[in-house]
Image (spheres, rainbow, N blue to C red):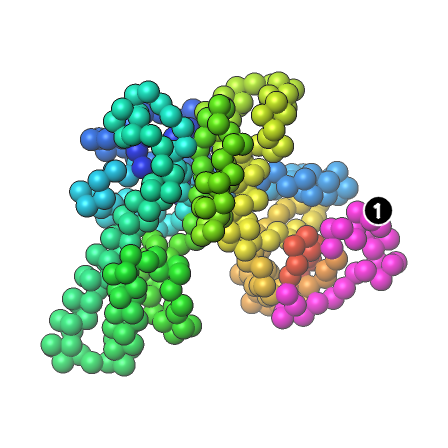
Amino acid sequence: MKIGLIGLQNSGKTTIFNALTGLEAEITSYSGQKVEPNLGIVEVKDPRISKLAQMYEPRKPIYTKIEYIDFVGLSEEVDNDVPTSELLTLIKTTDALALIVRNFDDEIISQTLGLPNPISDIDKINSELIISDLIIAEKRLEKIELSKKRGIKETELLIEEKAIKKVMEYLDQEKPIRELELSNEEEKTIRGFQFISQKPIMVILNSRENNFGQNEEVLNKIGNKYKVIEFAGKFEMELNKLSNEEKKEFMEDMGIKESARDRLTELSYDLLGYISFFTIGKDEVRAWTITKGESALEAAGKVHSDFARGFIRAECFSYDDLINAGSEKEVREKGLFRLEGKNYVVKDGDILKIRFNI
């Protein structure tokens, strides 16, 4: 899973990135200079994997991973700083975007940018993403028109033209594509463009210690349109330098029950509709991520393409049933062990053993 962190300059993106990854990327203004994005990969510490590892004693437990990409800060001046093609290419590789918005006062930053205004910042960021999508759509429409003038009027081209025009009409109203209702055919037609405003988006309200937990009104306003979470970014970055005992004590003082990483992981899974299933064996106990509603056949393909190609059955039981029963043997004796076909819809916490033959 790839999550892109985007936001206006001086919104605290890199601070949030460091809090999530435990890295120490340099915190600086990106204004007027080209800076490569910061990359960090973290494990999703699912306690179920830890428990399964205790029971099955594999050579290694393997957790799913999230890659965080801290992109260059966007300019306050929307019209003068449309994201570059290089930046757009990187953003397109993400599964979802986390918009970091400033909710803290800073003597130096506020002199330049004014007092924090999270709602306005969200609107500015969305405007930049919409403008970049409009440019892509316009360029593609120009190419379609050129093809038509040359006598190329294939059915697929005309279908694409209709879909692109529909997208452009919506973008012209300053609305992101993610809110546009598209038919399956239209969705398939524009998929290859990877429009940025079509990506799932969540918002991180970046506060400071002195105002964290006191922003219910602004959180509710943002929550009317987006999934939103509040971080005390600088505070949570500093927590990474403390021992686990000290970290727990400071988090309790702030009323923070989970780490920034755990909270954003939960929100990301919720936003993308992801669930986890597990495979077990002597070599490894492993967590896999799929989209809610996907079948046993699709889950098998996540593990290995041969499993999907030669799929016969999936031996299946749930993590909860295993824990309640105490052992896999007890799961079988209680009739909780199942054989499922390729159309079985996998549930969060399912443990699968794929039978296959090629």
As displayed, is residue 204 above or below residue 114? below
Tally the numbered discs. Answer: 1
The reply to whether residue 67 is visible in this rendering is no
As displayed, is residue 6 above or below residue 289? above
Between 244 and 258, which is closer to the camera in this rendering? 258
Residue on which disc 1 sits:
326
Between 235 and 296, which is closer to the camera in this rendering? 235
The reply to whether residue 178 is visible in this rendering is yes
Q: Residue at x 61, y 33 (%)?
A: 258
- Decide if residue 188 is on the left or right side of residue 259: left
Q: Residue at x 36, y 71 (%)?
A: 186
Q: Residues within 10 Å of mark 1 (few under 14, many from 20)?
A: few
Q: Amino acid at mark 1?
A: Gly
Residue 181 occupies which quadrant of the picture?
A: bottom left
Q: Residue at x 42, y 72 (%)?
A: 184
Q: Residue at x 31, y 60 (%)?
A: 193
Where residue 319 appears, as percent x and y from the top left, is 73, 51
- Decide if residue 172 is on the left or right side of residue 199: left
What stretch of residues is rendered in magenta? Answer: 318-345
As displayed, is residue 222 above or below residue 197? above
Between 165 and 358, which is closer to the camera in this rendering? 165
Residue 148 occupies which quadrant of the picture?
A: bottom left
Residue 55 occupies which quadrant of the picture?
A: top right
Where residue 153 appears, as percent x and y from the top left, is 20, 80
Where residue 175 appears, as percent x and y from the top left, is 33, 58
As helix, strand or loop, the secondary structure at mark 1 comes to loop
Is residue 284 found inside the magenta-colored segment of the image?
no
What residue occupies the far front of the structure in this picture? 217
Where residue 91 appears, as percent x and y from the top left, is 34, 47
